[in-house]
Image: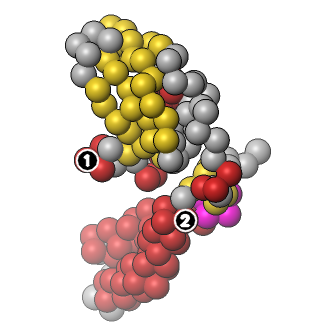
Amino acid sequence: MSDIRYYTEEGLQKLKEELHQLRTVERPKISQQIADARDKGDLSENAEYDAAKEAQGHLEAKIAKMEELVANARLIDESQIDNSKAFILSKVKIKNLGNNAELEYTLVAENEANLAAKKISVDSPIGKSLLGKAVGDVVEVKIPAGVAKFEIVEISR
């Protein structure tokens, strides 16, 4: 079963650029390290060669994982987003009912999450609890200190 993930145009482009960087820059760099280490002689006691081969294995695994992400990526059509409920790419203003603090987050795919930019993953505890909810709904989120209650104040794009 494929693991379909949804991305904004910007997020998918960033993923593709990172994959291109790994293929065109990092892969040749590691190949050169292996060649340099091989030229130093006896491979059975060559720590540089072993390290370079191990790094190559990690890189190839990362490239394979990213290729799978790109293959299973689906682009989100922002014009089709319904603002009556919270979905991916919705900007959601919530009020913490414990301390009345208001917070505003944009719900994004996991790889696009950036707390400093107020973008939280739909896979995070808060993100999961907000999905499919409407303005006025109260959601409960398990946090290390117990359970926090948030009221959805506004949903926009």
Q: Is residue 71 magenta?
A: yes
**Residue at (34, 21) in percent of width and height:** 95
As displayed, is residue 37 above or below residue 141?
A: below
**Residue at (48, 66) in percent of width and height:** 10
Whether residue 157 can be seen here: yes
As displayed, is residue 108 above or below residue 136?
A: below
Judge the density around disc 2: few (<14), some (14-19), many (≥20) Cα neighbours within 10 Å. few
**N-term-proximal mark, 1 vs 2:** 2
**Residue at (60, 55) in percent of width and height:** 78
Residue nearer the viewer, 4 or 153: 153
**Residue at (38, 39) in percent of width and height:** 105
Horizontal side, residue 63 vs residue 92: left or right: right
Percent coordinates x, y for residue 136 in the rendering = 50, 18
Residue numbers of the magenta segment: 68-72
Residue 9 is labelled as 2
Q: Could you say whether the residue bearing mark 1 is in a helix, strand or loop?
A: helix
Percent coordinates x, y for residue 96 in the rendering = 32, 18
Residue 35 is labelled as none
What amino acid is at disc 2? Answer: Glu
Which residue is disc 1 drawn over? Answer: 116
What amino acid is at disc 1? Answer: Ala
